[in-house]
Amino acid sequence: MSEPIMQVVDLKKTYPVPARHLGERARELRAVDGVSFSIPKGGIFGVVGESGCGKSSLGRCLLRMEEITGGSLLFQGEDITKLSGNALLELRRHMQMIFQNPYGSFNPKQKIGSALHEVAKVHKIPRGAAQEKITHLLSEINLPQDTLNRIPSEMSGGQLQRLAIARALLLTPDFIVADEPVSALDVSVQAQILNLLMDLREKFSLTMLFISHEMTVVRHLCDEVAVMYLGTVVEQAETEELFRNLLHPYTQALMSAIPNIDPDRKMERVILQGDLPSAIDVPLGCPFAPRCIYCTEQCRAEKPILREVAPGHHVACHLIGEAGA
């Protein structure tokens, strides 16, 4: 295993919540609550969970787009937790993001060529070198050169997301955060973008944090997967191990929601009761306890820690013993 590009240690991100009335105690929303993992060079680490579980906040913290409340980030062995100013700008050359909505990530009045050259200008890349790189990247994402003279409204969602990927690669970054990059696209286009990412991974040795709410997508693309719930990781393992041995009740529920096209393969649908609890008023014990059909008094009173129950397989659940028993 190669040295990690990104190391996340007990990362926390909270947001202050305004008081609803005079004299109310200060409150905070715990978006990310003690998350730790590492991503090796060339690896794709998947983060999956329902909307509101903290996936996007985690990704933005890794790129230092958000101030970190606690814990630390090490990028290529350097602590970047408190970088600011010019040091943070220099870091941007090595870390890029692919956003969820391709239409919202481009200026609707700006030509595509101008938008790509603007990235190069900010980071002081000579125009000639930038044009050469842009021409090469358009070829890699299978779009014609006259794309540069178009505006976003003349492009489809799939084409714009290809361009967003090219923009992220323009600076030859060492690390990319892809925040649900296919969820806003049609299913057929999703497959094309995922296959493109897999091809580019091989060509450019991409290291990536891939955020999604779909289990099938992370299974297709990622080497390792962390399942997030209410700001915490409840299960984490290498992809094949995770899908071969689903241990946490929440992971099982997510997997059961996937439509089954094999009539010979029966999987009981797990229906979660209630809504995702508030990240402001997190339950005292296990955050999943209010929705878990296996909940015990221990679950309601004591928060489980994320522990290794099998080689490389970590679960935060009181009911799971060693070796997944």
Image (spheres, rainbow, N blue to C red):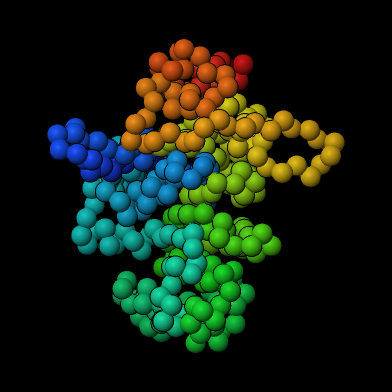
| Residue 98 image offset from top left, x and y in percent | 47, 61
Q: Residue furthest left?
A: 23
The vertical placement of 205 against 255, above or below, is below
Is residue 235 something one can see in this rendering? no
Find residue 228 and report its horizontal and vertical position in percent: 48, 37
Residue 71 horizontal/vertical position (percent) = 30, 37
Image point 43% across, 33% down: which residue? 277
How many numbered badges does the structure rendering display?
0
* Residue at (14% x, 34% y) in the render: 23
Location of residue 184 by image quarter? bottom right
- The residue at the point 51 percent across, 22 percent down is 317
Left or right of residue 264: residue 294: left
Q: Is residue 316 above or below residue 175?
A: above
Q: Residue furthest front?
A: 21
Front-most of residues 63 and 2: 63
Q: Residue furthest top?
A: 297
**Front residue (pair 255, 237):** 255
The answer to whether any part of residue 68 appears in the image is yes
Give the quadrant of the C terminus: top right
Residue 63 is situated, as x and y percent measured from the top left of the image, at 36, 53
What residue is at 41 percent from the left and 81 percent from the top? 110
